[in-house]
Amino acid sequence: MATAVDAPAAPTPPRRNRSRLTLRNTFIGWTFILPNFIGFAVLTLVPVIALFYIAFTSWNAFGQANWIGLENFSRLLTDGTFHTALFNTGYYAALHIPLTLAASLGLALLLNHKMRGIAFFRTVAFFPYITSIVAIAVVWNMLFSPDSGPINQFLMALGLDNPPGWTTSSTWAMPAVVLTSVWREMGYYMLLFLAGLQAIPRELYEAARVDGANAVQRFWNVTVPSLRPTTFFVTVILTIQSFKVLDLILVMTDGGPGTSTLVLAQYIYRKGFEENDFGYASAVAVVLFFICLGLTVVQFLLNKRKEV
């Protein structure tokens, strides 16, 4: 009598195993990035969306926001203080961006050489960036003091009879803020340029030397083109930071004398948190957002054209 033989169990299809492995890896990946996404959505995305809505309303942080359409943006056209803040922001950016680029690149070139104590000097150059901005403002206000400040004492020792009034002068207050800001931030951007310099292959400099290029020619024909990605990144970040400057001006001059150092970020703060006009403050913030967005897009297009 023949006995029935049980058929061997069918092996699990390899495709199912791969699906389970993919699902497991995807789940693990989401557990790592989901907290960041949730934080971004709650702390950044939702407030930005709310900002665009509030810009079209009249809202004082209490009660219901009333929809008023483009009225807040119409007020901007006739608001003289807004025009002053817009001009001051552009003035600050026009001085701050090129000076910080030049100072940080020069510092990086200087500290890119092998010499004794180089780590110490790099740390000293970076130290102002991590120093309290309040302490920096107090110290530089003492240095810029018109009567007893060391800077004016030095200028008078050189024979200058009427040195600038710096932070007490409506003409010299913004240059004083820009100089302080450049001194504080050049160490941070120096590190970015230093990383870019050390990524340039040494063979390029050796080939240039063989061709008879001097130091200036090697800088313009090897260093500058090789640093273009770093320079582009630094320029974009500097532009955005220049247009949203607030903390240094707030503690150094508070927008004065008069409105000579009032910038858009401080004007938004005054309208929103001092006058409770959050609708109008949001409209100014939307304008500032599109200025930064437009300048960034232009910089990307110019950089892309150079790459072609």
Image (cartoon, helix red, strand yellow):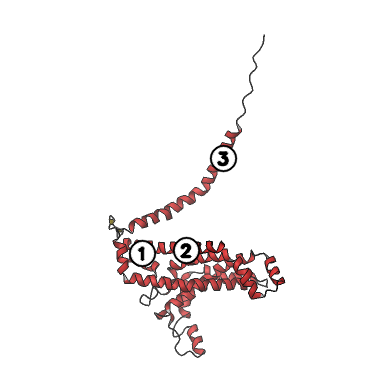
Identified at 36% across, 57% down, the residue is: 52
Distance of label 3 from label 1 (alpha carbons): 47 Å
In the image, taking residue 280 as reference, residue 11 lies left or right, namely right
Considering every residue shown, the one lying at the far right of the view is 210
Q: Label 1 is placed on what type of residue?
A: Val
Tag 2 and tag 3, C-beta contact below 8 Å: no
User: Mark 3 or 1 closer to N-term?
Assistant: 3
Residue highlighted by disc 2:
298
On the question of residue 140 being in view, the answer is yes
Mark 2 and mark 3 lie on one chain; the one further toward the N terminus is: 3
Considering the numbered disc 1 on the image, is that residue within a helix, a strand or a loop? helix
Tell me the residue that label 3 is attached to: 22
Vertical relation: 169 (above or below) 61: below
Quadrant of the image containing the C terminus: bottom right
Q: Nearer the viewer, residue 206 or 274?
A: 206
From the top left corner, tell me how far across and down residue 117 is, in percent. Answer: 65, 72
